[in-house]
Image (cartoon, rainbow, N blue to C red):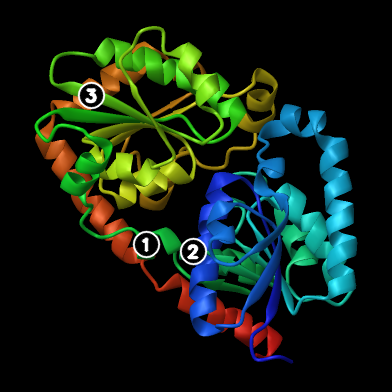
Amino acid sequence: MQTAPRLGMVAGEASGDLLAGLLLQGLRARWQGLKSEGIGGPKMIAQGFETWWPHSKLSIFGYVDALLNLRELLSIRKQLGTRLIASRPDVFIGVDAPDFNFGLEARLREAGIRTVHFVCPSIWAWRPERVEKIRVAADHVLCLFPFEPEILHKAGIGATYVGHPLADAIPMEPPRTASREVLKLPEADTVIALLPGSRKSEINHIAPALIGAAKLLAKPGRRFVMPVVPGLRGLVEPMLGGVDIQLVDGQSHAALAACDLTLVASGTATLEAALFKRPMVIAYRMNRLNWWRMKGKGLLPWVGLPNILAREFLVPELIQQACTPENLAREAEALLADAPRRQALRLRFVQLHELLRQDTARRASDAIATLIGA
């Protein structure tokens, strides 16, 4: 085998691209001649990744969106699998996107290609039936959270806790002043970051509630900033309705570092907010059919990653019918008015950061090297 392995990879949407880009950066430090190809986004491309399809093709959430795009998704997965079997990478790494990746991984594994799944699906929160799919699909799972390997080992699945690459990438002390300078936000103002998510469906369902909350929270000395995935600004701008919100292309980390509080869609961004030590109110709304299908699968009382990891309601969660401008504004005002509560949150988030900072790239590359004998 060549010294530097060749990887097949698939990452869907912005959060998967971010994780995969950080992983590739670390893997390239170990194997300088590393080659990688498949489906990815700009963070992966910046690490030399050759993209055959853009990651936006997989930026789909929920049953309704999946059904509407099913034919195209199945066609892409079939073509990709055929191409990977022909080129035979040393290992395939599926980054999140389990509904797409598990079927692909199972096919590749049957063809004799080693498979790794990066990010254990939330079987501890919902859809425990996925354990069997993981067993069929993955030779090894790289886990972001410390309690996950034990669950997988009990099911006979190889797994390694590698920590979270964002915990390595995000500084323990966020660059608040520098980020405000980048975003041209006054040092003295109270800044509230609005993070509605990276998918079109999230923008449609969540952004109006966040914008409505901003309207209720507006007063002299307060500023609002909303990072928007490039290409979706045109979807957001008509929603503003005269509310003074600064839209920025991407730059979610700058917004989180600069802000005093964030209203944030449930998902990876909530973990990012915690790593930036920012108080938050977690929001989420989805298509009614998606919500009806998912609400019965919940095994935990929390949906936000900071709360799941803490195993308590550290920060408020306003989900579906509760996700209204009035409720969001009320919880935000309560946090802004309670300095001891904000300081207590900061201390808990520092502990969380230390738990997840594990030099993920080194741990992951060690696990991959052991798997493929490199």
Does residue 100 lie above or below 214 as drawn? below
Name which of mark 1 and mark 3 comes first in the sequence: 1
Residue type at the position of mark 1: Ala
Quadrant placement of the N terminus: bottom right
Tell me: 126 left or right of 192.
right
Spatial separation of the CA atoms under disc 1 and disc 3: 27 Å
Which quadrant would the C terminus be assigned to in this image? bottom right
Image position, residue 58 (x, y; %): 70, 43
Label 3: which secondary element? strand
Question: Of the residues shown, which amino acid type is indicated by label 3?
Answer: Arg
Q: Are marks 2 and 1 in contact (CB under 8 Å)?
A: yes
Find disc 2 in the rendering and name its residue.
Answer: 22
- Give the alpha-carbon distance from disc 2 to disc 1, as whole Å: 8 Å
Q: Position of residue 336 (x, y in %)?
A: 17, 28
243 to the left or right of 338: right
Q: Which residue is mark 3?
A: 223
Residue at the image position 80 percent from the left and 28 percent from the top: 68
Instruction: Residue at 31% x, 44% y: name it.
Output: 254
**For the residue carrying disc 3, how many other residues have a C-alpha within 10 Å: few (<14), some (14-19), or many (20+)?**
many
What is the distance, in whole Å, between disc 3 and disc 2 at their CAs?
31 Å
Q: Mark 2 belongs to which amino acid? A: Leu
Q: Are marks 3 and 2 in contact (CB under 8 Å)?
A: no
Q: Which residue is mark 1?
A: 169
Q: Is residue 45 above or below residue 186?
A: below
Give residue 16's position: percent from left, percent from top: 57, 52
Instruction: From the viewer's side, name the closer residue of 327 and 296.
Output: 327
Of the numbered discs 3 and 2, the one sitting upstream in the chain is 2
| Residue 116: mark in rendering | none
Query: Would you call the spot at circle 2 few (<14 residues within 10 Å), some (14-19), or many (20 or more)?
Result: many
